[in-house]
Amino acid sequence: MSAAPRTLFEKIWDAHLVAPESASAPAVLYIDLQLVHEVTSPQAFAELRARGLRVRRPDRVLATFDHSTPTLPADASGKRPYATAEAEQQVATLEANAREFGIELHGWDSAHRGIVHVIGPELGATQPGMTIVCGDSHTSTHGAFGALAFGIGTTEVGHVLATQCLLQRKPKTLAIHVEGKLGKGVGAKDLILHIIGRIGVNGGTGHVIEYRGSTIEALSMEERMTVCNMSIEAGARAGLIAPDETTFMWLKGRERVPQGADWDRAVERWRALRSDDGARYDADVYIDATAVKPAVTYGTHPGMVVDLDAMVPAATDAQERRALDYMQLDAGRAIAGTPVDIVFVGSCTNSRLSDLRAAASLLRGRRIASGLRMLVVPGSEQIKRDAEREGLHDVFKAAGAEWREAGCSMCLGMNGDIGKPGQLVVSTSNRNFEGRQGPGVRTVLASPLVAAASALAGRIADPRDVIDADTQEAA
Amino acid sequence: MKPLTRLHSRTVVLPFENIDTDRIIPARFLTTTERAGLGRVLFNDWRYREDGSENPDFALNKPDAKGAEILVAGHNFGCGSSREHAPWALADYGIRAVLSSEIADIFRSNALKNGVLAVVLAEGEHRWLLEHPGIELTIDVAGSYIELPDGGRFTFELDAFARQCLIEGVDQLGFLLKHADAIVAFERTREAA
């Protein structure tokens, strides 16, 4: 009997079925790894305690704190500048829960504390073929490794803590085929913004996206994480990329991956994790990578995307008019040149070493515009150390930017890193919702290169102009 | 979880598309370690003015919206983050049902686990409800229909399992825990491989 061709998603799904779904009940899906942070876990631990339940597999849980944590260092007495006593209490609650339930926590004393979606891969906890969940929608990031990874609510966090399983209806599949070479100054962030602009903020609802094609294969691991990270911004449950040599090379030798002969066996197994020839998806979208340009958002959701060399599009309905009003942007005017108050480089989308290097490459030997504030927030303690070893922190500081401690920071402003009403932030994060970076704050999503170019100009700027100037100078 | 079998209420309408979870409850209110009490910050930055007073123009603040348990919202409600604080805030405020033409996956899943019916209606029916704010509706969960004042009905699809949980007011954890033996067997098989 020859098995029907299956997609990558179906292979992972099938391998984790404890009980298949039926008309009357969803599937019971086994979860290999749960990542936990301070914001979406306290009520789940409380539920376990109330029901007298233990964490079933503490070895399959990894915790850190990142959202409510200050990005300014502790003072001489060791006191950290939390935004509120409640935020400090939330972090203390996770510390207490981790102790009580026997969970590995990467806290203040860990060399690996950081954004949960940055440290999972960094530790090698994220591996191909796994099912991974977290009470955080950007769990889709881990799909870059060919893991089925998705965000869940706190009730479900409790379910997984107690049973290592989740009740799930099987989602549909959407293949996004990307072919061609990305141009100069165009990166993974521009690509995913282009894709969301094309399919819309609900284009992936009910689906798991598989990104495939020569463009995707050519992306580095960190770029793949940027792409998969924003799958949720298209409404998708998860984003997936088939693991390949790039994936294996990146993971090899990391703390939690198999070593020696076990590593070889694991890689052998992982090589089968790709969609079979002839496998069918519920929907397909085709993207020409050569048409992707440096792009930014101009509205109040991540689907309102405009190329940097284009004009702000005219509003087609009341919603878009409202968004343009909020953003104080005029349709028909160039998006480039819009004055900027703050530049934020960070978040689970773009806070990895390559992102920091990209931003630093434009800032080296230059100063950011006067009056502009720039925050650079590495994704983890490890990235912070690696960046400092390369001297990137000196580049940022010499340019006039603030070099901060690892965390989510201004992506959602939970820790007090926010702008003032009316200010415009060019941000390498993932959401430009109204008020996301503080009440009344206007967010423009961009790549690290666009963010750095904009910081130099004090206006939304095209990094290709800075790159061209550098090239001419060198010639 | 409070059982939900039948609901009779006026609607309150937020006609905007893509109402995201940061609109429903801004991130700065997520430092709580409790589930309760979030109703007061539901739609905070819409509901209140900068001085903390109620914004009289916001739909939920209109006198006839007080006590409404059915929210009719624009397309793609609940997009964005996985924060369960969003349905916690809605439920705590008193909203028991959200009707839209599209609802984001994680929000819908979270809502149904907290006794908040979140269902998608056909576009024409949804549009009609948007155009008739404050109308009295009866929602029958078991029958999966909405009854209009003139006796007309809009039907909706609801997963059989989620419907049962809503009607009985039970959390799904009990159902999962019943699979303990199957989970052990699954782990053994995998470890042997």
Image (spheres, coloured by chain):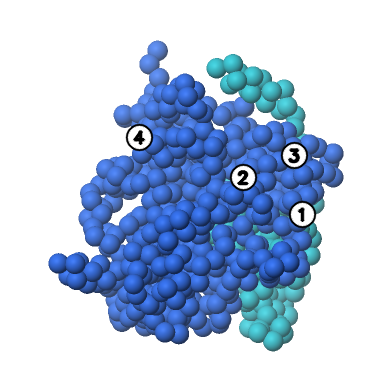
Chain colours: A blue, B cyan
In the image, taking residue A120 as reference, residue B53 lies left or right, namely right
In the image, taking residue A248 as reference, residue B148 lies left or right, namely right
Same chain, marks 2 and 4? yes
Q: Is residue A463 above or below residue B168?
A: below
Q: Position of residue A300 (x, y in %)?
A: 47, 71
Same chain, marks 3 and 4? yes
Report the Cα–Cα distance between label 2 and label 4. Answer: 25 Å
The structure residue drawn at horizontal position 41% and vertical position 57%, both measured from the top left corner, is A390
The structure residue drawn at horizontal position 46% and vertical position 29%, both measured from the top left corner, is A11
Q: Which residue is mark 3?
A: A102
In the image, taking residue B101 as reference, residue A106 lies left or right, namely right
Q: Give the mark nearest the N terminus, 1 or 4.
A: 1
Q: Secondary structure at mark 4?
A: helix
Residue toward you, A284 or A192: A192
Q: How many marks?
A: 4
| Label 2: chain letter | A
Q: Is residue B52 above or below residue A435?
A: below
Q: Amino acid at mark 4?
A: Glu
Q: Amino acid at mark 3?
A: Gly
Q: Which residue is mark 4?
A: A245
Query: Would you call the spot at circle 3 few (<14 residues within 10 Å), some (14-19), or many (20 or more)?
Result: some
Report the Cα–Cα distance between label 2 and label 3. Answer: 14 Å
Q: Which residue is mark 2?
A: A35
Residue toward you, A119 or A176: A119
The quadrant in which the C terminus of chain B is found is top right
Q: Secondary structure at mark 2?
A: strand
Query: Would you call the spot at circle 2 few (<14 residues within 10 Å), some (14-19), or many (20 or more)?
Result: many
Report the Cα–Cα distance between label 3 and label 1. Answer: 14 Å
Same chain, marks 3 and 1? yes
Same chain, marks 1 and 4? yes
